[in-house]
């Protein structure tokens, strides 16, 4: 019997997806002991094999492969030619590029291949409470890309992405059923409890009112009259209307109306990002005055370019990990702040509260319970684990955030040791590693305040460790908001690092990954990008949930000029990535 076959599924005859949803939380390895007592082996039990059921067979009505409907192989959203504000239309799809840097492609492999796993990666959703008093919108005075005119529509956009995933009838290349979905962090934006509730409800299903503060109307920069920001319901000339952004009466009222999410119909797993771990994605927890601003009744909406540039430098150059510069700035500008409605729901949440929320039965959805996290994580204070993707494929979710502050990441010695042990224990399984940060963005080695003596490790060290394990086939991540696929050759094996663009910046993408055995000594990872289900064309008079999701995409395409760069090159989008089978 396969070590990943579930006894329950063998006896009761239930299908594999039911087993995954119902029991995966029991079968994951929480990675707890090393974090608690690094020198006490009794506190760190060996990770167990995932208890997935037998390999599911394709449903009778499954489409023949290749299956491109609803993917960027068929069509992509693209701004129409012109200058100024550009309306959205459809463009030809992106073809598939074969990449053979790590293994040569052999002819006839499409006729021989066997599907091993297929999953969907969602990354950098950035569910935004756009009225949150602590937001740094005023950095727009120093940099145009520091604020997004579509930030009030992140919930509608995310629900539309869920609808797209649910509508996929099969994996595009093999026609196999999709096994699960995995988020790779920055699920929230401000580390606010409002956003955490919205994120978990979007993926689990339910009703969301994407509003905080005054329940009757929007209170934020988009009806402030400050010309830095797009004022959609005003006839005044702001920085965006001068570029052709439309006037849309009723936009803000529609943006805070109730939204309904069907929830993912696939089992889904959650990985933490820096915006989930720290206030504003870059400040360590612990400053009570910043927390008071988050829930309070005053909001700074305007700042001069010089002051904005100084604050922006303090963040980007990692000069203010605890938010002291920000706190002092806010204290000095209290008279310039505007009154808003206080709301305790905007309070920052701690890593432990993040895990506890995932365990709440209200957010179970398609399962599994905890979406990778267990009560052992609450006891240990860790957020890394293993989970079954398919019968012969193991997922490993890492926590690469640095609690000491700053948006770049690293990994502690305890977690790195646990990862090495996990990969050795499961050497007979193919392993896909998930994290928020990329190898190049793991450059922050500030000590974890909870473990001040523990060494932090950069991305290069993680790449080296993964390369020592021939069972690692891919490292899937986000953070950089750009499609980028990198081959890595290690001392014992090779793997592909697959970074996917965010869903908050245009081109607003997620990615399907399929692992297949080519029966010729090679494996292939097929990556296929998908957009949300919202139509490419928009109608300024359509303020329905779907209409707002379409506007979310169009506004994002006009918010910044570098969408082509974030799309990556053809070899970073829809691909076939070859590997030698070990």
Image (tube, rainbow, N blue to C red):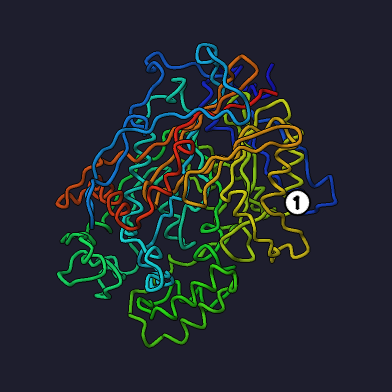
Q: Is residue 96 visible?
A: yes
Residue 468 locus on image (x, y percent): 75, 37
Q: How many marks?
A: 1
Foreground pick, 545 / 104: 104
Picture quarter containing residue 453?
bottom right
- Please state if 423 lies on the left or on the right of 337 as rendered: right
Residue 503 locus on image (x, y percent): 40, 48
Residue 357 locus on image (x, y percent): 52, 52
Picture quarter containing residue 580?
top right
Please state, as top left, top right, bottom left or bottom right, where the N terminus lies in the image.
top right
Q: Residue at coordinates 35% horizontally, 61% vertically from top-left?
A: 148
Asked which secondary structure carries label 1, the reply is helix
Foreground pick, 104 / 48: 104
Residue 184 locus on image (x, y percent): 53, 46
Picture quarter containing residue 346?
bottom left
Q: Residue at coordinates 37% horizontally, 17% vertically from top-left?
A: 63
Q: Is residue 454 positioned above or below 48 on the image?
A: below
Q: Is residue 179 visible?
A: no
Q: Residue at coordinates 46% horizontally, 17% vertically from top-left?
A: 58
Q: Which residue is mark 1?
A: 414
Judge the density around disc 1: few (<14), some (14-19), many (≥20) Cα neighbours within 10 Å: many
Q: Residue at coordinates 85% horizontally, 51% vertically from top-left?
A: 39
Please state, as top left, top right, bottom left or bottom right, where the C terminus lies in the image.
top right
């Amino acid at each position: 019997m396969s070590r990943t076959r579930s006894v329950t599924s063998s006896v009761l005859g239930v299908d594999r997806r039911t087993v995954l949803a119902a029991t995966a939380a029991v079968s994951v390895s929480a990675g707890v002991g090393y974090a608690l007592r690094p020198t006490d082996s009794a506190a760190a039990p060996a990770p167990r094999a995932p208890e997935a059921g037998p390999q599911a067979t394709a449903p009778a009505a499954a489409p023949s492969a290749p299956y491109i409907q609803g993917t960027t192989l068929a069509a992509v959203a693209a701004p129409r030619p012109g200058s100024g504000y550009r309306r959205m239309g459809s463009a030809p799809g992106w073809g598939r590029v074969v990449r053979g840097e790590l293994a040569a492609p052999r002819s006839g492999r499409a006729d021989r291949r066997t599907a091993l796993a297929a999953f969907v990666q969602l990354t950098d959703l950035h569910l935004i409470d756009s009225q949150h008093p602590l937001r740094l919108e005023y950095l727009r005075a120093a940099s145009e890309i520091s604020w997004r005119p579509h930030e009030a529509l992140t919930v509608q956009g995310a629900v539309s992405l869920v609808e797209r995933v649910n509508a996929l009838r099969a994996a595009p290349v093999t026609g196999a059923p999709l096994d699960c979905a995995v988020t790779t962090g920055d699920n929230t934006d401000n580390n606010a409890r409002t956003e955490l509730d919205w994120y978990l409800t979007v993926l689990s299903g339910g009703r969301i009112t994407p509003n905080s503060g005054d329940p009757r109307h929007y209170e934020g920069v988009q009806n402030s009259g400050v010309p830095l920001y797009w004022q959609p319901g005003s006839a005044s000339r702001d920085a965006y209307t001068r570029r052709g952004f439309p006037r849309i009466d009723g936009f803000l009222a529609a943006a805070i109306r109730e939204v309904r999410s069907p929830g993912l119909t696939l089992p889904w797993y959650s990985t933490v990002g820096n915006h989930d771990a720290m206030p504003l994605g870059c400040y360590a927890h612990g400053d009570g005055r910043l927390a008071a601003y988050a829930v309070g009744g005053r909001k700074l909406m305007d700042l001069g370019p010089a002051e904005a540039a100084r604050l922006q430098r303090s963040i980007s150059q990692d000069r203010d990990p605890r938010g002291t510069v920000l706190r002092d700035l806010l204290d000095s500008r209290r008279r310039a702040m505007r009154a808003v409605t206080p709301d305790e729901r905007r309070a920052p949440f701690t890593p432990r509260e993040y895990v506890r929320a995932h365990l709440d039965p209200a957010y179970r959805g398609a399962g599994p319970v905890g979406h990778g996290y267990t009560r052992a994580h609450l006891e240990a204070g860790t957020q890394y684990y293993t989970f079954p993707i398919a019968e012969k494929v193991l997922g490993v979710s890492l926590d690469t955030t640095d609690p000491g502050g700053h948006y770049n990441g690293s990994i502690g010695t305890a977690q790195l040791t646990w990862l090495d042990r996990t990969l050795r224990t499961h050497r007979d399984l193919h392993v896909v590693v998930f994290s928020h940060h990329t190898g190049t963005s793991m450059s922050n080695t500030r000590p974890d305040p909870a473990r001040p003596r523990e060494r932090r490790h950069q991305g290069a060290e993680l790449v080296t460790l993964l390369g020592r394990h021939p069972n690692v086939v891919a490292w899937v991540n986000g953070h950089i908001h750009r499609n980028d696929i990198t081959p890595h050759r290690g001392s014992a094996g090779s793997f592909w690092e697959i970074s996917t663009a965010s869903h908050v910046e245009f081109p607003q993408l997620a990615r399907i990954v399929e692992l297949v055995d080519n029966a010729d000594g090679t494996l292939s990872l097929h990556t296929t990008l998908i957009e949300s289900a919202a139509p490419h064309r928009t109608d300024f008079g359509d303020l329905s949930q779907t209409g707002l999701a379409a506007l979310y995409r169009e506004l994002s395409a006009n918010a910044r000029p570098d969408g082509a760069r974030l799309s990556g090159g053809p070899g970073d989008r829809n691909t076939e990535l070859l590997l030698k089978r070990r």
